[in-house]
Amino acid sequence: MAVTIGIIGLVKSGRTTIFNAATRSNAATGSYSQSSSANVGIVKVPDARLSPLEEMFHPKKLTPAEIKYFDVGASLKGGTKDSSFSGELLTQLQNVDALLNVIRAFEDTAIPLPAGGINAERDLTTMNAELIFSDLTIIEKRLNRIGSQMKSAKPPERAALEREKELMARIKEAMEKDIPVRDMEVDEEEAKILSGYQFLSNKPVLMVINIGEDDLPKAAEMEAELNTRYGGKNYRVIVICGKLEAELINMDEAEATEFRSSYGLKETGLDRTIRASYDLLDLISFFTVGPDEVRAWTITRGTISQKAAGKIHSDIERGYIRAEIVHVGDLLTAGSLAEVRKRGQLRLEGKTYIVQDGDTANFLFNV
């Protein structure tokens, strides 16, 4: 299953332009602010290790990892009266792995400035309030329901409801002080309770500062400074010129590379966005290889072998016996799996082995 990212942002932030650049799409910009459905795009995750693996195995199919982006429309109200996210859009956002918040930092006479001009900190605060407001509505409804359930609950159920009530009340109090769920300290049991709610303000956020072409020379310095101020657990910041990136996707690769180099840019905005997303979510890739398919799989860093096997199929996880593991670097150096075996580099690992980035795995199972 693909990693999912919900793209949000205030009106005129360049949100859909960033979506187009990230997904090589041509979704309408400007006129598209808020609708009942999202723009959706799927991106193949670039991985330099796939090409040499393809050359080695000549598979019938080559399958990179994927990221699915949802452009859910602009926030229109900024959390002042009610939430802009509701219905299908809210459901889509609740189900994503992370949020990508586009913040305007460019000037363009054709695109009116927001009231008060360009102010990234104000826009961050506004969107944070929007997400919190959406979550508060859910919490208030849940607290009311808990009150009703406790009237007829048996002692064990009552104790669980009481713990949940205390947690919801604590979160509500924090939110009323503009503190998002992701910034709160919770224990393991509380985190398990929260996982069932998919609160928007509990999702990791990649902040994309959308600058103009004139600011590109200082983009790296700006990005470093903003990550010092806002980066950390559950937060990352990247600085991108959305307009330029959207233009480059319509050029051939050689022309785009040359044009990008003229601005001192070494890689695409898409590649940087994907890398920042993986870093934010602490994701890595492992591979399955063979004549039928070479495929990259995405897992969270620290995932044990049996759980990684479940990414491929639940039967493999259930009937897991062991895994044959070799790192892609050793495999490519050896030139073949036969040579890997000859060199004694193919390891047998049990259920609790922690899969590493770049591992190739053959899972042995019985069901």
Image: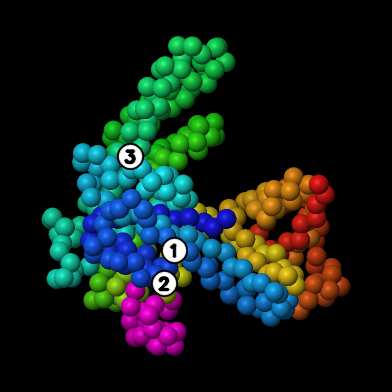
- Sequence order check, earlier mark of 2 and 3: 2
Residue 253, magenta (yes or no): yes
Q: Quadrant of residue 231?
A: bottom left
How far apart, in angstroms, are the residues tagged by discs 2 and 3?
Answer: 30 Å
Question: Camera-side residue: 353 or 110?
Answer: 110
Question: Camera-side residue: 176 or 131?
Answer: 131
Q: What amino acid is found at the position of numbered circle 3 in the picture?
A: Ser
How far apart, in angstroms, are the residues tagged by discs 1 and 2?
Answer: 8 Å
Find residue 218 and report its horizontal and vertical position in percent.
Answer: 29, 73
Q: Which mark is residue 253?
A: none
The residue shown at (62%, 61%) is: 297
- Sequence order check, earlier mark of 1 and 2: 2
Which stretch did the figure color magenta? 246-267
Q: Which mark is residue 134?
A: 3
- Sequence order check, earlier mark of 3 and 1: 1
> Mark 2, mark 3: which one is toward the viewer?
2
Proximity of marks 1 and 2: CB atoms separated by less than 8 Å: yes
Q: Which residue is mark 2?
A: 24
**How many residues crowd around disc 2 within 10 Å: few (fewer than 14), some, or many (20 or more)?**
some
Find residue 302 and report its horizontal and vertical position in percent.
Answer: 62, 51
Find residue 157 and report its horizontal and vertical position in percent.
Answer: 54, 17
User: Does dot 2 land on a helix, a strand or a loop?
Assistant: loop
The residue shown at (68%, 69%) is: 294
| Residue 97 can be seen, yes or no | yes
Q: What amino acid is found at the position of numbered circle 2 in the picture?
A: Arg
Which quarter of the rendering shows the N terminus? bottom right
